[in-house]
Image: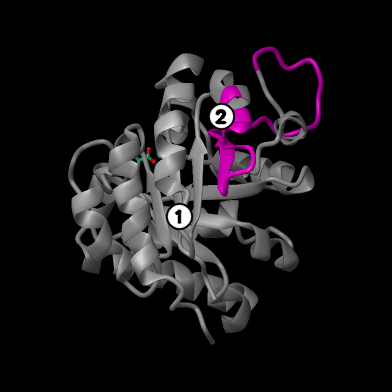
Amino acid sequence: MRTPFLAGNWKMYKTPKDTQAFFDAFLPLVAGATGRDAAICPPYIDLHVAIAAAAGSKVGIGAQNLAAGKEGAMTGEISGYMLKAIGCRYVIIGHSERRQYFGENEAGVLSKARAALEYGLAPIVCVGELLAERESGSTEAVLAAQFDGGIAPLAPEQFAKIVIAYEPVWAIGTGKTATPQMAQEAHGAIRLLLNGHIGAAAGAKVRILYGGSMKADNAEALLAQPDIDGGLVGGASLEPRGFIKIVQAAQKLAPQRGQS
Ligand code: PEP
């Protein structure tokens, strides 16, 4: 069974003071929510405040990136070992903004996913096609290449601890959302890759989140698709009242999927 999972990606927004204000408003709203997992991934400088604020709640905290390795002469970097030490549970890996602006590729995604798992963090590994790739009909080939290079080489038992986020790059921060059918097609393709690689029983347990302009008014239709197990939510996670509506949309669907 796959429990719906909603993770907020705050990107480069919010100071520690803003973070405290978010949790002061969000935690009472989310307190009664059951049957789903929720997480917030703030900037590094906000992690301490977020972890302290969320302590005792069911909201997990994650980082948006990590460096492979434990420690060393790596100016400006933060490792999974360090993130775990302060209480992070998740880390986003291979977000398209990191691929686009920081040159991340499949080899880097794989080594970061391995580092996350080594230090006890659940990696949220992002995959997704560019607009030109969708328009040329190569979405499934792109997803397969990203899966083969960045995810498939993990050890079979590690798949139980990962989350995959399908994020069509053309839908991120643009207000353009994949239709529920388009998103389901891509999620179905990823599920088939998983099933082919680790078997259908294990593949049915991996959560695949949708990301790309998910909001309160489109979340329910997206989350109703059989292979959409939650969302990686950017802009709409910055505001407590908007994000809680997405969490509540997921809650309506729980716990009814992935039984095989
Ligand atoms: C993201 O940053 O992962 C994302 C999906 O952003 P947005 O929801 O703003 O499109």
Q: Is residue 58 magenta?
A: yes
Marking on residue 32: 1
Q: What element carries label 2?
A: helix
> Residue 204 location in percent, x, y?
54, 76
Question: Is residue 1 on the magenta stretch?
Answer: no
Q: Residue furthest top?
A: 75
Residue appearing at x 66%, y 59% in the figure: 161
Residue 131 in the image: x percent, y percent? 24, 46
Ligand 1: which quarter?
top left
Quarter location, residue 77 = top right
Report x, y in % for residue 21: 42, 23
Span colored in magenta:
49-76
Q: Which residue lies furthest to the bottom in this view?
A: 260
* Residue that carries the numbered disc 2 in the rendered image: 50
Instruction: Between residue 222 and residue 148, name the one nearer to us.
Output: 222
Q: Quadrant of the N terminus?
A: bottom right
Q: Position of residue 124 (x, y in %)?
A: 54, 49
Secondary-structure class at tag 1:
loop
Query: Does residue 111 lie above or below 139 as drawn?
Result: above
Please tell me which residue is depicted at 47% across the width and 75% down the height of the picture: 192
Residue type for callout 2: Ala
